[in-house]
Image: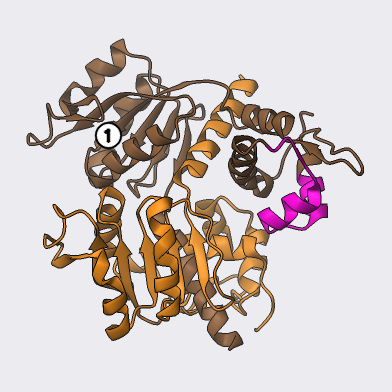
Chain colours: A orange, B brown
Amino acid sequence: MEKNISSAVIKRLPRYYRYLGSLLDNGITIISSRDLSRKMHLTASQIRQDLNNFGCFGQQGYGYNVELLYGEIRKILGLDKTYNMIIIGAGNIGQALLNYINYQKRGYNFVGVFDKNPKLIGLNIRGIEIRDIDTLDEFLKTTKVDIAVLSLPGNNAKPLINTIVTNGVRGIWNFSHLPIVTPEDVVIENVHLTDSLMQLTYKLTEKEKGL
Amino acid sequence: MEKNISSAVIKRLPRYYRYLGSLLDNGITIISSRDLSRKMHLTASQIRQDLNNFGCFGQQGYGYNVELLYGEIRKILGLDKTYNMIIIGAGNIGQALLNYINYQKRGYNFVGVFDKNPKLIGLNIRGIEIRDIDTLDEFLKTTKVDIAVLSLPGNNAKPLINTIVTNGVRGIWNFSHLPIVTPEDVVIENVHLTDSLMQLTYKLTEKEKGL
């Protein structure tokens, strides 16, 4: 099962995971690749190929065991572990993320929120006190943090990268638009919300052509 | 040039677009596929394949004309047009988006923001007054809106879909997690921020295995 899985498949996994989770919530324990394909807007053979990658073979004429499949994907996505996270930048995006992720609770523990704005420092959002960004280094020296969320402008984020990585943070979820170059052992996921908006305007344009 | 382009290529286009834009900002007018590939973390042959899709052929030993390529991708993504947008839900996500998109200005015009919270209605954010959600139907009957952003919980979004699509809105940028089924001529782009976080935890898990 330890093969190299294409990044396109990996990108689809959260969707499988979300959908299987909603099936479980609704008490559905078995699903055929045909039903799965309809919901996921993929062909049934694509579904089978994707899931075979992980050694998940549906039973002919029977289907996939939803719970097993969900558990397998959960493990692949690293969601069977817990992660200590901090948010750097307590503006709208930072607060929205805190909301968002807390709401979806899956082993993400927010252990700190930081900002440089004196009006925000000391405030409590969702039970977490906003700390002075100047205390970040000190905080990281005493608290294990796995993931740092950068929800502040790139220029402000830049001087913090060194502090973050030298203190052992291994994952950066980057909303700052700062192109980050880090040591080999740190992973980064960059988010550009407007990329998704561009996909929408692309589809709108395609539709228009077809009219 | 009117071929069917794979969705994987389409998903990469915003990244090309952003990167070429930053080159232009820095006065760079020519780029080789090798340099482009290094920056985009794709192979040079992948880059050539991607761009050939759009009839953009670099000149051997010379490279791509950045401005032409940028203009071509801009057109493909539908960014040579302007879009009237409304935001439904003026919470953190709604306000963050207003911020975010305004900052990146590319022909997106916010013409209205709506909420049901009496504490928000009437307030001004970034120069736009927050309107009562009950006035949405009336608003849409008199104002041309191309894209509606759903930045409110799915349960609240559900009863609004009909109002939105019957009034001619053709694009929905959906942050609500509501699975939306709409008429053929409406396009939807669903955003699940946690999908991106799951990509990060996947990569962290892979790194750990490699250690």
The spot of residue B206 in percent (x, y) is 56, 79
Residue name at image x 91 percent, y 44 percent: B61
The spot of residue A190 in percent (x, y) is 50, 57
In this rendering, does residue B93 appear at all?
yes
Q: Which of the two residues, B96 or A211, is positioned nearer the viewer here?
A: B96
On whether residue B48 falls in the magenta region, the answer is: yes
Q: How crowded is mark 1: few (under 14 residues within 10 Å), some or many (20 or more)?
A: many
On whether residue B13 falls in the magenta region, the answer is: no
The quadrant in which the C terminus of chain A is found is: top right
Dominant secondary structure (helix, strand or loop) of the stretch shown in magenta: helix
Q: Which of the two residues, B207 or B85, is positioned nearer the viewer here?
A: B207
Q: In this view, does A30 lie to the left or right of B4?
A: left
Q: Which residue lies furthest to the right in this view?
A: B60
Residue name at image x 65 percent, y 73 percent: A52
What's the residue type where badge 1 is placed? Ile
The spot of residue B133 in percent (x, y) is 18, 29
Q: Give the range drawn in magenta.
A: B28-50
Q: Which of the two residues, B200 or A178, is positioned nearer the viewer here?
A: A178
Residue name at image x 26 percent, y 77 percent: A139
The spot of residue A43 in percent (x, y) is 64, 54
Q: Is residue B53 left or right of residue A159?
A: right
The quadrant in which the N terminus of chain A is found is: bottom right
The subunit letter for the residue under badge 1 reads: B
Q: Residue furthest bottom?
A: B211
Residue name at image x 40 percent, y 35 percent: B103
Helix, strand or loop under label 1: strand
User: Which residue lies under the disc numbered 1?
Assistant: B88
